[in-house]
Structures are given as C-alpha cells and as structure tokens.
Amino acid sequence: MGKVCAIFGGSRGIGKAVAELLARKGCHLAIIGRNLEVAQNTACGLGAGHLALSCDISREQEVQRAFEEIQRNLGPINYLVNAAGINRDGLLLRTKTEDMVSQIHTNLLGTMLTCKAAVKSMIHHQGGAIVNIGSVVGLKGNSGQSTYSASKAGIVGFSRSLAKEVARKQIRVNVVAPGFIHTEMTAHLKEDELKKAIPLGRFGDPHEVAQAVLFLLESPYVTGSTLIVDGGLQLLI
Ligand code: NDP
C-alpha cells in the first residue's frame, strides 16, 4: 500500500520536487497551496490518484478542513511535509510589522498548525513521519533576514521538542535546512556573486532537497535531526 502524504507548499519549488519524488515511490499525495489552480496542475502532472487543495497554512480552520478532506479522500496520513514558506527580506529597521507577522504566521505558526493536525491523526494510526523545511539561515543567521531566520530557527526548536513529545507514539519529526536552491523564491538573487560563497560552487536543485526529505521520511531510527542541504554554505558563514 502506498503511503499517504500531505505536502503543504507542494504546488511549486521544493515542495513540488518532493511531490514528484514521492509520487514515483508510489505515495498518494495531497498537494496543498493557496492557489488551487497551481496545486491542481502539479497534482495532475503526477498522475492519477492525487489530491489538490487550497489552504492558507497560517489559518487554523483552513488547515483543519484540509486534513479532514485529505483523510476523507486518501485515508489516514502517514507522512507530512511542510514546504510552505515566504520571505520578506530587508534590514530590521526597514521591515514593516505586517511583514514580520506574515513570515512568522506562514513559516512558523503554519508549521505548528499542520503538525498538530497531523499528529492527532498519526497517533490513532500507528505513527508517521514529519519533515519540516527550515533554512540554513535559521541556524547561522543572515543580515537582511532577521524575521525569516527567526521563523526558521523556531522550526528547529519546535521540531526537536515535538520529536520528544511524540517519539513514544512512533511519530518522527525532522528538519531539512536548505541553502540557496533554484526556485521562484531565489529567482531575483544574483547567483554569480552568491555562489562564490558556496563550497560546491552552485545553487542547489529542488530535487536535491527532495532526496534529503525522502531520506528522513524513510529512516526509521532518525528523529529530532536537522539535515543541512546547502552545498557546504554553512561551513563558511
Ligand atoms: P516557492 O516560493 O517556490 O514555493 C512556496 C510554496 O509554498 C508554494 O507552493 C506556495 O503556494 C506555498 N505557500 C506559500 N505561502 C503559503 C501559505 N500561506 N499557505 C499555504 N501554502 C503556501 O518556495 P521554495 O520552494 O523555494 O521554498 C519552500 C520552502 O523552503 C520554504 O519554507 C522556504 O522558506 C524554504 N527554503 C527555500 C530556500 C531556497 O533557496 N529556495 C532556501 C531555504 C529554505 P501558494 O503561493 O499557491 O500558496
């Protein structure tokens, strides 16, 4: 039987690459983003038997509705991947409070809400595995990304604590912390300059992050870990 996996932020970028890999592994997927049409296009591209949903991860009622719909259509959830995220970069003194709030609500609160809903289901169905997407800047910090970094550092603390809470229920919680990855989020960056700071000399591909997500989903004795996927960037910053 294929595993049932909910991928928040599965419609584009890193989440979409995770979806493509898990679909090849025979998983039944729920592809979730705010834009339903984009989620539907991604789900259709994966073949039959996958679900597309619109949900704002920062809104509790929408998250609860999404989980109800996933379980009604696909059955109990085995895997949760949180790849929904936004950035509003800028020096702290120039950052509007509303941009701080939206990053914390989407990146951190959203992760907490989906994990809470997933754990509620997994507890009743012999466990499961969760991978939350953090960032190397959540571990190392970055000028111009203080709120974003705080949201990603929060994901690490949250995931480690939740891993302790739910280990006895055979639920594992891990984090993947990417560096610069080719997606819409990084499309505006000056790669030629930035790649000089990356030991492997290039930005990563979303599929290279997906491999790390799959590893953590499938590794039965790994929980509370943060796996850095950054071409060695953290070695130098
Ligand atoms: P993209 O912008 O390419 O994709 C973001 C995804 O998240 C989309 O599917 C988007 O769908 C969804 N999303 C955004 N906001 C919400 C929301 N409020 N509710 C539900 N879904 C939402 O980003 P990436 O693929 O690059 O990023 C994926 C994750 O990886 C993020 O958490 C990001 O912070 C992290 N990351 C990315 C790095 C990179 O270099 N790209 C580096 C380190 C971390 P929609 O817009 O339809 O809602």
Image (cartoon, rainbow, N blue to C red):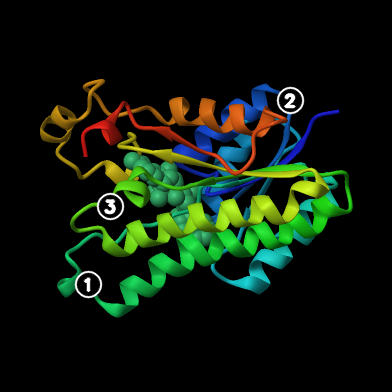
Q: Nearer the viewer, mark 3 or mark 1?
A: 3
Q: Residue at position x 13%, y 28% from top? A: 196
Q: Residue at position x 39%, y 57% from top? A: 86
Which disc is residue 26 wearing?
A: 2
Q: Quadrant of residue 216?
A: top right
Would residue 34 be visible to someone looking at this image?
Answer: no
Would residue 22 be visible to someone looking at this image?
Answer: yes
How crowded pointer 1 is (Cα within 10 Å; few <14, some 14-19, many 20+) is rated as some
Residue 96 x/y as whole percent: 25, 76
Which disc is residue 95 wearing?
A: 1
Q: Residue at position x 62%, y 65% from top? A: 113
Of the residues shown, which amino acid type is indicated by label 2? Gly
Q: Indicate which disc, 3 or 1, sits on the residue closer to the N terminus.
A: 1
Would you say 76 lies left or right of 165 here? Answer: right
Identify which residue, 24 or 93, lies in the foreground: 93
Residue 21 x/y as whole percent: 59, 26
**Total marks in image:** 3
Q: Indicate which disc, 2 or 1, sits on the residue closer to the N terminus.
A: 2
Of the residues shown, which amino acid type is indicated by label 3? Gly
Q: CA distance from mark 2 to mark 3?
A: 37 Å
Q: Indicate which disc, 2 or 3, sits on the residue closer to the N terminus.
A: 2
Residue 171 x/y as whole percent: 75, 45
Q: For the residue labelled by badge 2, is the local secondary structure a helix, a strand or a loop? A: loop
Which disc is residue 188 wearing?
A: none
* Tag 3 residue: 141
Q: CA distance from mark 2 to mark 1?
A: 43 Å
- Please identify the residue farthest to the bottom as the structure is shown: 97
